[in-house]
Amino acid sequence: MALHHASPGELVHLASVTSADDPKTSALVKTDSFEAMQLVLRAGEEISNHSVPGYAIVHCLEGRAILKAAEPIELAAGDWLYFDRRQKHSVSAIEDSSLLLTVIFD
C-alpha cells in the first residue's frame, strides 16, 4: 500500500506525542523540490547516523532531543535549525518528542 502524501492545499493535523492515539513517524509530502515528515520519537529512541541529499530543516514541536551532527545540539520545543545537504547526523530523544523535518532538494 502506498503512503498517503498531502496534496497542495490539503490540511494535515500533526498529532501530539501525548495524544491517546499513539502517533507515529509519518511522511507528509514528497515532491521533486522538497519532502516533509513528522518524526515521533519516544524517550530513549534514536535514529542512527545518516545523511539526506538536500538541506535539512528541523523544527522541534514537542519534547527534547539531541541532534548530533558536527557538534551535538539539544533541541527543545520551539527550536529550529537547518544544516547542509549530505551532513551526517543522528537524532536521539531525551523525552517523548515530535520533530517536523523538511528536506529541500536542489
Image: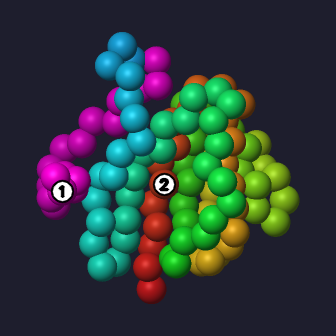
- Work out which residue is located at the far right of the displayed protein and give it: 71
Q: Which residue is mark 1?
A: 2
Residue 88 location in percent, x, y?
A: 69, 69
Q: Quadrant of the C terminus?
A: bottom left
Q: Which residue is mark 2?
A: 101
Task: Describe residue 5's horizontal placement relative to residue 57 as left or right.
Answer: left
Count of labels in the image? 2
Residue 49 location in percent, x, y?
A: 68, 60
Label 2 is placed on what type of residue?
Answer: Leu
Label 1 is placed on what type of residue?
Answer: Ala
State whether residue 47 is above or below residue 105: above
Q: Does the residue at mark 1 contact the one at mark 2 (Cβ under 8 Å)?
A: no
For residue 39, which numbered disc appears in the image?
none
Q: Is residue 64 shown to the viewer in this render?
A: no
Q: Is residue 31 shown to the viewer in this render?
A: yes
Mark 2 is surrounded, within 10 Å at the Cα level, by few (under 14), some (14 to 19) or many (20 or more) other residues, namely many
Task: Describe residue 25's horizontal placement relative to residue 42 as left or right.
Answer: left
Q: CA distance from mark 1 to mark 2?
A: 20 Å
Using the image as rendered, state which of residue 10 and residue 95 is in the foreground.
Answer: 95
- Residue located 39% across and 17% down the image: 19
State whether residue 5 is above or below residue 62: below
First to last magenta residue range: 1-18
**Mark 2 element type:** strand
